[in-house]
Amino acid sequence: MPSNSLLHFLTKIINFEGVKVTNYHFITDNQLIVELENKETIATCPHCQKNTDKVHQFYRYNVRDIPVSGWDVFLSVNRL
């Protein structure tokens, strides 16, 4: 497991407001997956528009990001 200081550093580099890095994995010699998580624990229901802290669906999307120093970077994002 990566250290908290390294995860904080990666969160600062990615610089998405309201998102933090929770982990990362090397897939191959030149591919990296960075797992992201929403800092907010409350979401708005798309059907009734009420705020809730209960997760009704958990599905991760892998999104290709800009390559860094020859590494193919993928962001693993939870759709909440």
Image (cartoon, grey):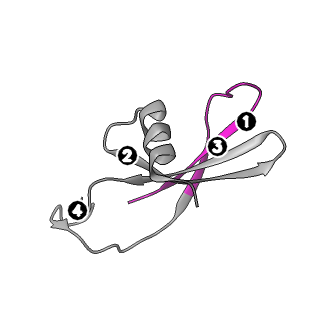
> To which residue does mark 2 refer?
19
Query: How far apart in space, not on screen, are marks 1 and 4 (Cα)?
Result: 32 Å
Query: How far apart in space, not on screen, are marks 2 and 3 (Cα)?
Result: 15 Å
Q: Residue furthest left?
A: 50
Disc nearer the start of the sequence (2/1) = 2
Write the residue at 64% across / 43% down. Answer: 74
Asked if the stretch drawn in magenta spans residue 69, the answer is: yes
> To which residue does mark 3 refer?
74
Are circles 3 and 1 on residues that touch, CB within 8 Å? yes
Over which residues does the magenta segment extend? 61-80
* Most foreground residue, 8 or 14: 8
* Most foreground residue, 63 or 9: 9
Amino acid carrying mark 1 in the image: Asp
Relative vertical location of residue 33 with respect to residue 59 in this rendering, above or below: above
Are circles 2 and 1 on residues that touch, CB within 8 Å? no
Amino acid carrying mark 3 in the image: Phe
> To which residue does mark 4 refer?
42
Horizontal side of residue 80 vs 2, given as left or right: left
Amino acid carrying mark 2 in the image: Val
- Residue 72, numbered label: 1
Disc nearer the start of the sequence (2/3) = 2
- Residue 36, numbered label: none
Residue 53 placement (x, y as % from top left): 23, 70
Q: Secondary structure at mark 3?
A: strand
